[in-house]
Image (cartoon, helix red, strand yellow):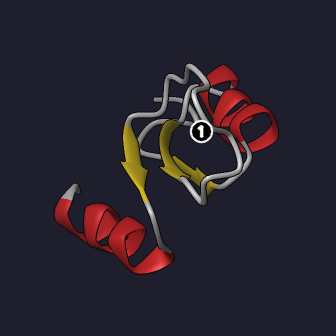
Amino acid sequence: MTLADGGWMVGDHLVADIGGGRAAGLRTVWIDRGTWPDQEHEADHVVTDVLQAMEILHAVR
């Protein structure tokens, strides 16, 4: 088991948050605030607010 096992990165910056989280082996939730239109991403989940992100984190254990 590694430190990243079961870990999550939640953020609104595609490079620093989502890219960094993926590089660290974490599952990711991108809070899409419309600042990265038409950008490719590899986020595991995409939401529009923190409450939706929390719902995902509580549902996936």
Q: Residue at x 68, y 40 (%)?
A: 36
The location of residue 8, given as percent across then percent down, is 51, 49
> Where on the picture, by quarter, is residue 57?
bottom left
Q: Residue furthest left?
A: 59
Point out the image quarter for the C terminus: bottom left
- From the viewer's perspective, tell me whether residue 24 is left or right of residue 16: left
The location of residue 54, given as percent across then percent down, is 38, 73
Q: Residue at x 18, y 64 (%)?
A: 59
The residue that disc 1 covers is 3
- Is 10 placed above or below 39 here? below
- Is 7 placed above or below 21 here? below
The location of residue 2, given as percent across then percent down, is 54, 30
Q: Residue furthest bottom?
A: 51
- Is 25 placed above or below 55 here? above
The location of residue 34, given as percent across then percent down, is 61, 53
Helix, strand or loop under label 1: loop
Figure disc tally: 1
- From the viewer's perspective, tell me whether residue 53 is left or right of residue 24: left
Q: Which residue is more in the foreground, 36 or 42?
A: 36
> Where on the picture, by quarter, is residue 39?
top right
Point out the image quarter for the N terminus: top left
Q: Residues within 10 Å of mark 1 (few under 14, many from 20)?
A: few
Q: Residue at x 60, y 60 (%)?
A: 33
Q: Residue furthest right?
A: 16
Q: Which residue is more in the foreground, 28 or 12?
A: 12
- Is 48 placed above or below 21 here? below
Amino acid residing under circle 1 = Leu
- From the viewer's perspective, tell me whether residue 30 is left or right of residue 57: right
